[in-house]
């Protein structure tokens, strides 16, 4: 559904290209996680996809339509983005106005709006705050509203640029589970930028970016199976995974698989200690 062809981009005030010759494709229903160190160009990619920035050279296509002025409506109708800092994306004076804003732009009839607002705010557990002023919310609550506003648009491509970073682990899981559900059931594609290794479990593929260039695109499964690749990436691993990676390193053996749960790890450790 989305295709980058040799895309190069430079901010006007920077000397070097921020992105250089980037090519990749995203299928309908694919969940792609983009990984790269700070400043490698991940957010710039998302801003190009949401048409907030325009390429210097190369081409981007959505449903085989090039990113050109006459296709801007197609892009706006199908792509929704949630940024890392939710403060910069509030447009409404209240939570519900914020969700309604995008719907009005999309010319959704007002009698349908109430249902969409209630539905999307419930999905992120923020319905009771519908009359609240966004500036009075916590960072995590703001992120949830930003996610609700994006989901209300029923996009075909949802971009999460570190959009769950301020959430506590439980709410992050709940929201990611919900997005995974619509990703599968409604074939919504997801591009997610994250430093959280647990998100790999939701992804089909992983794109590695370094200094504005693509290093590789691999399947999330092969990434999860490769402890070294995981520990070398800039992902924050959960404790159990860190433990497994460190044990494998010390033992110089890939005994602990990234898929092992706590019970399996304990089992393997006992066998090692008791040499059974
Ligand atoms: N508006 C801007 N004007 C000039 N340079 C910018 C602008 N925004 C970003 N840059 C620069 O472009 C490069 C890529 O930035 P980008 O925000 O895309 O990186 P990122 O991978 O998203 O980083 P992070 O992990 O910190 O979010 C960086 O060197 C950054 O300083
Ligand atoms: Mg960024």
Image (cartoon, rainbow, N blue to C red):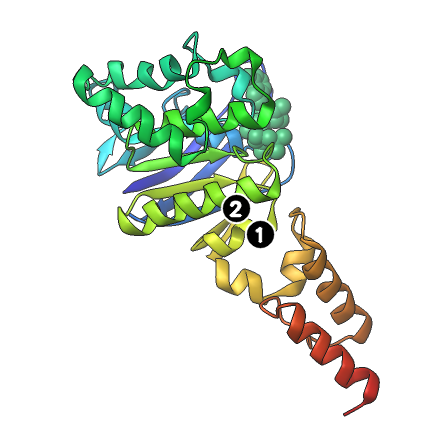
Q: Is residue 238 above or below residue 96?
A: below
Q: Quadrant of the C terminus?
A: bottom right
Residue at (43% x, 30% y) in the render: 147
Residue at (51% x, 27% y) in the render: 143
Q: Quadrant of the N terminus?
A: top left
Q: Position of residue 13 (x, y in %)?
A: 57, 13
Camera-near label (2 vs 1) is 2
Q: Which residue is mark 2?
A: 173
Residue 17 shows in the view: no
Q: Which residue is mark 1?
A: 198
Does mark 2's beta carbon lie closer than 8 Å to ligand 1?
no
116 and 13: which is toward the camera: 116
Q: Is residue 128 above or below residue 92?
A: below
Residue 158 shows in the view: yes
Q: Quadrant of the rendered structure where residue 23 is?
A: top left
Q: Which mark is residue 6?
A: none
User: Are the residues tagged 2 and 1 within 8 Å (C-beta)?
Assistant: yes
The crowding category of the residue bearing disc 1, from other C-alpha atoms within 10 Å (few below 14, some 14 to 19, many at least 20), is some
Distance from Cα at disc 2 to Cα at disc 1: 9 Å
Please state the quadrant of the image where ligand 2 appears.
top right
The crowding category of the residue bearing disc 2, from other C-alpha atoms within 10 Å (few below 14, some 14 to 19, many at least 20), is some
Circle 1: element type: helix
Q: Quadrant of the rendered structure where residue 269 is?
A: bottom right
Circle 2: element type: helix
130 and 145: which is toward the camera: 130
Q: Position of residue 110 (x, y in %)?
A: 19, 15
Which residue reaches farthest top?
Answer: 93
């Amino acid at each position: 559904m989305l295709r980058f062809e040799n895309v190069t981009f430079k901010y006007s005030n920077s000397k070097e290209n921020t992105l250089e010759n980037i090519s990749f494709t995203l299928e309908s229903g694919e969940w792609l996680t983009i990984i790269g160190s700070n400043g490698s160009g991940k957010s710039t990619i998302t801003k190009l996809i949401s048409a907030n920035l325009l390429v210097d050279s190369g081409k981007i296509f959505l449903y085989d339509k090039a990113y050109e002025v006459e296709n801007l409506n197609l892009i706006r109708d199908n792509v929704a983005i949630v940024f890392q800092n939710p403060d910069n994306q509030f447009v409404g004076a209240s939570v519900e106005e914020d969700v309604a804003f995008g719907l009005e732009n999309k010319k959704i009839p007002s009698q349908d709006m109430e249902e969409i607002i209630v539905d999307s705010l419930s999905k992120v557990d923020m319905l009771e705050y519908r009359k609240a002023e966004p500036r009075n919310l916590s960072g995590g609550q703001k992120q949830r509203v930003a996610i609700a506003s994006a989901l209300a648009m029923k996009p075909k491509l949802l971009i999460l640029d570190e959009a769950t970073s301020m959430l506590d682990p439980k709410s992050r899981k709940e929201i990611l589970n919900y997005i995974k559900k619509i990703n599968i059931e409604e074939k919504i594609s997801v591009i997610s930028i994250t430093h959280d290794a647990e998100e790999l479990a939701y992804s089909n593929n992983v794109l590695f970016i370094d200094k504005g260039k693509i290093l590789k695109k691999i399947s999330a499964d092969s990434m999860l199976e490769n402890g070294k690749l995981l520990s070398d990436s800039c992902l924050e691993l959960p404790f159990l995974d860190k433990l497994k990676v460190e044990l494998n390193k010390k033992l110089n053996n890939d005994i602990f698989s990234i898929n092992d749960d706590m019970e399996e790890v304990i089992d393997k450790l006992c066998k090692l200690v008791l040499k059974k």
